[in-house]
Image (cartoon, rainbow, N blue to C red):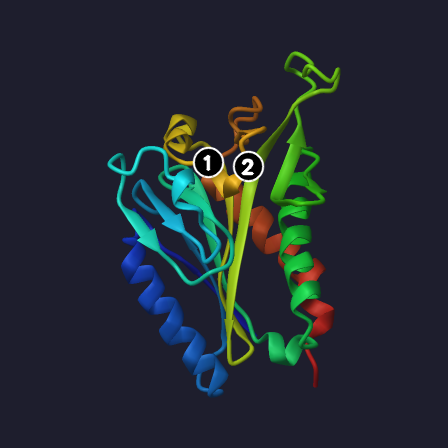
Amino acid sequence: MVEWITSDGLTPYEDAVAKMESRAERIARGEADEAVWLVEHPPLYTAGTSANPADLTDPDRFPVFPTKRGGQYTYHGPGQRVAYAMLNVGARGRDVRKFVNQLEEWVIATLAEFNVTGERRLGRVGVWVVRHDKPLTAAGEPPEDKIAAIGVRLRKWVSFHGVSINVDPDLSHFDGIVPCGIREHGVTSLVDLGLPVTMADVDVALMRCFDRVFAAEQDA
C-alpha cells in the first residue's frame, strides 16, 4: 500500500527533509505505509554528497542546503514537481541499482504521457530530451537538455528524496549552479518544450505510471 500525499503551496526544504526522515523511519519499523509525497519548494539549491563547491557559481542567489542524498548541486523551486519516494526497497528486491533504474523509468514513462521522449545518458545523471528544435552543436548533433533530476538516499533499506520534473519553473534560476556538475548541456521544462502542461496534469501521469513501473517488485 503506497500513500499518495500532495502538499499545496511551497514546502520549506528543511521541513520536507524532517518529515521524510520521520516517515522513512516509521516505514522501516513497520509502523507506516510507503508513501510518495508531491511538493513544490521555494527557490533553493541543494548540495548532494558529491557536490563540487566550484559548481555553486552564485552562492548568494538562493539558500543552499547540504543534503545527504546522492548527486551534486540541484535547483528546486516553483513550477517544478518534486516527488519524494519513501519506499521499502528491502521488500522490493534489495537491488539499489535496479531501484534507481525504476525511478528513471518512472520519469520516462511520465514524460511519455505528454509525448515527450525522455532518455538516459551514460555518465549523466537524470533524464534528458533531444532538442531537434534548436541549432545543431559544433559536432553536428542536436543539443540535449535535462528535464528531470534524480537523487535518493536509503536508510535501513527505505528510500527517501526522489525525483524532480521541470514543469514550468523559471529556468534562469538554474544559472546559479552547474546542475549535477554538467556544463555542456542545458535544462528545459515541459512548458519550455511548448506543451501547455499543468502541475495537476503531471501528478495524474506520475500516479498512473507508478504502478506500471513498481508494482511487481514487492516481496510477499
Q: Is residue 172 left or right of residue 212?
A: left
Q: Quadrant of residue 210?
A: bottom right
Q: Indicate the quadrant containing the C terminus: top left, top right, bottom left or bottom right.
A: bottom right
Q: Is residue 101 above or below residue 180?
A: below
Name the spot of residue 85 as percent of width and height, x first.
51, 63
Percent from the top left, x then y, of residue 171? 43, 28
Residue 151 image position (x, y, % from top left) = 52, 55
User: Do labels 1 and 2 touch, CB within 8 Å?
Assistant: yes
Residue 139 occupies quadrant = top right
Does residue 40 appear in this view? Answer: no
Can you tell which mark lies on residue 182? 2
Q: CA distance from mark 1 to mark 2?
A: 6 Å
Query: Which residue is pictured at 75% across the width and 15% down the height?
Result: 140
Q: Which residue is mark 1?
A: 178
Neighbours of disc 2 within 10 Å: few (<14), some (14-19), many (20+): some
Please, what is the three-letter code of the amino acid marked with disc 2?
A: Ile
Residue at image position (46%, 88%) is: 29
Element type at marker 1?
A: loop
The percent coordinates of residue 135 (x first, y second) are 65, 11
- Position of the N terminus by quadrant: bottom right
| Viewer-nearest residue: 203 or 14 | 14
